[in-house]
Structures are given as structure tokens and as C-alpha cells.
Amino acid sequence: MTLQLAANVVVLACIYALVSVGYVLVYRVSRVLNLAHGELMMAGAYFLVGSSGLFNHDPVIGIGMAVLMGLLMGIVVYLALMRWMTGKSVLAAVLVTIALGILLRGLVVLVFTAQQFYPAAALGWNNAPVPLPGGVRVSMASATLVVITIAIYIALFLFLRFTRIGIQMRAAGQNPLLAAQRGIRLHAIYAFAWGLSTFTASIAGILLALDSGVDGQMATIGLKAFPAALVGGLDSFIGACIGALIVATAEIAAIQYVNPLLSDVVPFVVLLIVLAVRPWGLFGSREQLDRV
Amino acid sequence: MSGLSAKQRGNGWKWLLAAIGVVIVFAIPFVARPFLLDLANQVLLACIGALALMLLTGLAGQISLGTAGLLAAGAYCVGILSHNFNAPFWIILPAAGCLGALLGFVFGLPSLRLRGLYLAISTLGLHFIVVYLGGEYETRQQLSTGVMVDPPAIGSWSLASNRGWYFTFLAFAALTLFIVFNLKRSRTGRAWRVLCEREVVASAIGIDVQRMKLLAFVISSTILAVAGALFAYQRNFVSIDAFSLYLTIQYVAMIIIGGMGTIEGALLGAAFVVLLPYAIEGAASHLPARLSSFVFALNYAAFGLVMIFFLLFEPTGLVGIIRRIVRRRRRPDVPLHPAGSNEH
């Protein structure tokens, strides 16, 4: 029982961590808070719904296409919308992302109708529970999600530390002016950061869709992952991980021991506590607060 | 800004327009069909909320995403007090106002430490808490759909007709307009404007920043809670489903689409956002069946597009567009700006 709870916490924490990494990426590089992240994640899941019906229901090509679309989606969003918000107030940029979120919520229903989809079935993949030691069971998709989350965090760490583009991204985040002076193409870097962000979001959306289907409600998960990013500090990847763990633990504990209705509210309670005590988050850099 | 001289010249016209406006406003409930009257009611209610939010965000510069939470608090005040305590409306409305003031204080507390985005997010958190408490109340009372509310009554007379509600909303909207208009021109309003521009300057010239911030939150939230209470009374029904995040975004959109920081903007924006879905519904009958069968999704998509359009191309909102047209009429020698460009 306790072990099963712990497993649930780990799975939920990985969901939040995988989603909140996108918030952190965009915020850290371009100082924009993307409140459409949940909807972009949902759009990624719907890409899978679209692609799972094509290509003879081949899972590899289907998922690959959906992930690629997810990557392109972020670049398109940046080039079409967010690029024009450079130099405008922070609030205006956030409101554009909120508007984008609403637009996406409408569009997915217009394109895919409001019914719930199960792309796992369309791809002929049965999501069997994986027995783990101690009588713990998690679904195959959840187990995959945990592994992929860890892999993505490690890959991102290596990417930002050792590759040329990764270093340029960090530079752009730290000081855009100096970065531009050194010949870093800011728009390209920002567009790439958005692409990476929706790429990870789409992976999260796809895995969640494979696990339990997708409908218009999926975007809520994105919103609940946001406290995780903020608790850890909006510009810290380690923070996002630990924030996700804290929020997930609090949420599962509240559902288990207090009231299942609390599930939607607990992340935000945690967020309010952190905002009151340590507004820049556990690992965030303190100067950020003055910028916003 | 050349608006000042234009204002002085246009005073005669302004009075005439105002007189026509007043006549129309009073004629609506007697000539309009029930459907249109209901629309007018919705617009008036939205005007109250939009003015309250404009006061907070447009004047005092405090970003809040808690609008729906505050409306819900007012509505639940009606639901709980009339369902469990059978309280009459003349107790409930002031109670809703007090609850709003209290919540405004609570919603405003983060503003003492946080600015901009972080403030918006903390109010968002409070929104979820209010909504949770509302849902929890519904479950505890075993009300699966929501709380039924009797219309406000004095003796045997009760306020149930749409026409009665029209004048009620009109009175409350006028009162709100009066409050906001006067606050804007008062010492408090000027202090808010400094606060909005630069907090450091505000404190340097002796404005009590913390007090002013909290005051803005308290006044705005009181109005919003009363508006929520009126909403509950008019619908005779309170359900937490009515107070989603989408409602908050609609109110934020009102003050953006109308034009940030202006009273006319809040009113125009309220009318625009309320009427847009009906315009879309009307247009949807001409669209392919696939699109028209999901009118709500069409609404979402159109609403998102309109909001993006205004944020990207027309940050001064409808008021900015109107001002530009008026100015162009007055001074034809001014070179025309290409459509969609913003003036600063």
C-alpha cells in the first residue's frame, strides 16, 4: 500500500517534471511565462490521435510524426506570435499565451470533435500493468514516462552544458543584449527554446494519451504542473524536478488522506505557501523577481 | 497628447451623444425583445465586473487573475446564506460586499511582496481555492448540480422580471461607474496611477504604497463580489461550473479589448466580449455543419484569435481605434496611418 503510494507519487512527479521542464525552458531563455503550455501539451497528444490513424497504424512512425509536429509547433508559435511581443510588457506576452491556449482549446475540438480518444488502441498497443517488486503495479505507459523523463532531464543537462546551441541558449537567458552583441541570433535561439519546450510537452501529452486517452481536459494537467515549476524556481531545472516531487507528494497525500476533491487545489496551495515564504522558488535566482 | 484639445472642441457633441445614450438606455427594456433584454442584462453585469477589474489592473496596475473566484465568492454568499439561513437580500448583498472586501484583502496580501507575473499567479492560486471551497460546499450539502436561490423579495413583491433586473443592473452599473469615475480623478486615483507607472517613485513622493495596493484590491473585490451576488440572484441558481478560469480570462479580455486603463474601454470591452459569442452563434448557422455543431469550440477559437489580434496589433483597444477615427475626422490633414498600426 505504502509502496504503491510511493510509486504513484513518482509517476505523478515525473508527469509534472516532464511538463514543467517546458515552462522552465521558455522562461529561462526568453523570460516569458507560457501559460498555454498545457494546451500545447494537449495539442501534442492530438497530433498522435491524428497520426495514429495514418501510416497503417505503425506506432513508431505515428509517434515519431507526432513528436516532430510537437517540435515544429513551438517554433511556429514563436515565429508567428511571440516574436512580435519582444519589448512589450511581460503581462502582454503572458496574455498572448493565455489567448493562444484558448484558441488551441477551441481548435482541437473543431478538428477532432469533443470525444475522448485512445490512441494506444489505434496503434494496437495494450497498456499492460508492469508488476514491480513489492506488489506495486504501474501501467506500461507510466513506467515509460518515468524512464523518458529521467532521460530528457539528463539529455537537457548535457545539451545546455556542452553543446554550442545549449550554451548560446543559456547566454541569451542570462543577458540578451550581451548575447546579441556576441553574434548570437536571439530569435533563432528563442524559437529553438520554444520548439524544445513544446517537444517535451508533446512527449508528455503523447505518453499521457497512451496511458489514459486524451480529451479537452488534458490541458488542466499542464496548469497543475505550473506550480511545480514555480515552487522549484522558474529558471532552474533541478528546481522543476524537486518542485514536481513536492507538489506530487502533497497532492497524492491529500487525495489519499484528506479528500479527493483537493487534487486540483493542492498544487496551488503549495504554490501560495512558496510564494509567501520564498517567492523566487527553492532554486530560482533571486534577481528575477525584480525583473517582472 | 492632442486628445485634450479635441475633447474641448467636442464638448457640444459629447452632451448630445450622452443625451441620446441616456434615452436609448432607458428605452431598451420597453422596446427590446426578451432575448435582447437578456443580452442587455448580461452586458450591464459584465460592465460592473469590467469596471472593477479596470480599477485594479488599469488604474492601480495590479494584475489579478482572481476575478472568477471573487464573483464565485459573491454568488456563494447568496447561495449559502439563502439556502442554509434563509437570509433576505438586504442582509445578503452587504454580506457579499463584506466578504468581497475581506477576500480582496487576502487576494491583495501577495501584492505587498510580489509584482507582475507572480502576483497574477498568486491570485490564480486563490481562485482555485475559492472554487474548491464552493465545490466542497456543494458536495457537503449533497447538491449535485448547484444551489437554487429565490429571487430577492420585499413582502409579496419579488424581483423576477427581466425588466426589473435591467434597472437593478443599470443602477448598480451606474453606481460602479460613479465610484470608479470619481476615484480615478481623486487623490487615490492619482496615487494609483503613479503606483502603476513606477512603484519606487510612488513611495518616494510619499504615497503609502502598501495601503494603496490593498485599497485597490479591497474596492475592486467588493464590487466584484456584489456583482457575483447579483448574478446568482438573477439566475436563481449558483453552480461552481459557472466560475471557471475562462470567466476570469473573459474579464481580463474585456479590459484589454476595450482599452487598458480607460472607463470607456471597460464598458466597450464588456459589451464586445458578451456579445461576441452571440454574433458567432448567428454566423455559425451559415458555416458547414461540422463547425456549427461545436459552437462553444468556435467561441473559444474566435475569442482567442480576437484577443491575440488586440494584444499584437491594437494594444490601445477599441478606445484607441475610436480615438484614431475621431481624430482623423477632425483633422483631415493628418497623414493616415495604415490599418492596424498602433499610435504612441
Image (cartoon, coloured by chain):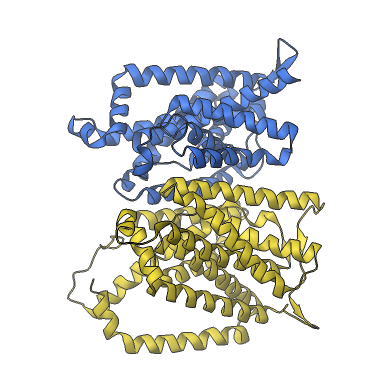
Q: Where A189 sits versus B217, above or below? A: above
Q: Nearer the viewer, residue B182 or A35?
A: B182
Task: Specify whether B68 is left or right of A134.
Answer: left
Residue A289: image x %, image y %? 38, 41
Residue lying at the far top in this picture: please name it: A133
Q: Where A185 sits versus B164, above or below? A: above
Position of the N terminus of chain B, as image quadrant, is: bottom left
Task: Specify whether B337 is left or right of B78.
Answer: left
Task: Specify whether B136 is left or right of B303.
Answer: right
Residue A249: image x %, image y %? 63, 28
Q: How many marks?
A: 0
Q: Where A167 sits versus B156, above or below? A: above
Tell me the yellow chain: B
Residue A200: image x %, image y %? 48, 28
Q: At 52% across and 79% down in the image, what residue appears? A: B174
Q: At 75% across and 57% down in the image, what residue appears? A: B146
Q: Nearer the viewer, residue B286 or B251?
A: B251
Visible residue check, residue A288: yes
Q: At 42% across and 66% down in the image, what residue appears? A: B258
Q: Nearer the viewer, residue B275 or B127?
A: B127
Q: Nearer the viewer, residue B193 or A12?
A: B193
Q: Quadrant of residue A222?
A: top right
Visible residue check, residue A198: no
Q: Quadrant of residue B91?
A: bottom right
Position of the C terminus of chain B, as image quadrant, is: bottom left
Q: At 47% across and 62% down in the image, what residue appears? A: B216
Residue A252: image x %, image y %? 67, 30
Of the chain colours in the picture, the one used for chain A is blue
